[in-house]
Amino acid sequence: MKISVSFLKNKTDVRDTLEKLDETTADFIHVDIMDGKFTSEKTMNEYEFLDCLKGIKKPLDIHLMVENPTNYIEVLKKLNPRFISVHAEIPDYKKYIDLIHSYNIGAGIAINPKTRVMNVECLDNVEYVLVMSVNPGLGGQKMIPETIEKLDILQKLKHEKNYNYLVSIDGGVNLESRVFLNSADVLVSGSYICMSDNFQEKIDSLK
């Protein structure tokens, strides 16, 4: 099981958190970016993220919760991330997947809790599928149980159609929910890891 750590985005200590995560065995650092339009919450902008993530060695898994991803992709490509994910709920999402691929970056599609897998049209053209098990925008939410079945659906499609993506789940991932998540390839966890005094211990408990 791969672990992607969603760091807490307090501007005063974000760099310290990132440097500590860089020394752990986490597989990815998950970067949530919100524009205050697609979600009610707003994070730092793409330029601030570019600045604070410079020099981080871990592969980056960037999640764009934004209405218009173009400039975010153009700016954040400079970090050479492993994946950039856009949402299936925005218009023309397939053109952003093509843009991400044009920079030789793995493209991901994020799926909100109410979005059905069968309504997502790009599964043959992504390297990463991010199943949102909470409504995007706020950290520390409890997992919506009905979203877990999407993991099995995505794995079945992957094997039947020979697709080439990792299946990831984001929201409410902790030791209690871990037992239900064996069908995932990647677990995205934030508060459970970053609110603790020992990042590595929490990462190990999810592996």
Image: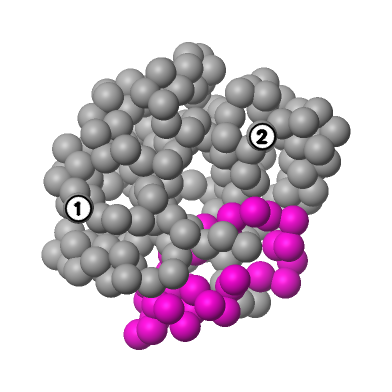
Q: Disc 2 to disc 1, how far (Cα)?
A: 29 Å
79 or 190, nearer to the observer: 79
| Dot 1 crowding, Cα within 10 Å, few <14, some 14–19, many 20+ | few
Determine the residue positioned at 53% across, 17% down.
94
- Could you say which disc has been placed on residue 169 in the image? none
Determine the residue positioned at 81% across, 28% down.
161
Location of residue 190 in the rendering, given as x and y in whole percent from the top left corner: 44, 64
Residue 185 painted magenta: yes
Residue 80 painted magenta: no
Position of 83 with respect to 185 (left or right) is left
The secondary structure type at the circle numbered 2 is: loop
Q: Quadrant of the C terminus?
A: bottom right
In the image, which residues are magenta? 178-207
Q: Quadrant of the N terminus?
A: bottom right
Task: Examine the image and state in which quarter residue 38 appears.
Answer: top left
In the picture of the structure, the residue carrying the numbered disc 1 is 55
Determine the residue positioned at 53% across, 77% down.
204
Location of residue 80 in the rendering, given as x and y in whole percent from the top left corner: 32, 38
In the picture of the structure, the residue carrying the numbered disc 2 is 164
Determine the residue positioned at 33% across, 21% down.
70
* Amino acid carrying mark 1 in the image: Gly
* Amino acid carrying mark 2 in the image: Asn
Position of 176 with respect to 81 (left or right) is right
| Dot 2 crowding, Cα within 10 Å, few <14, some 14–19, many 20+ | some
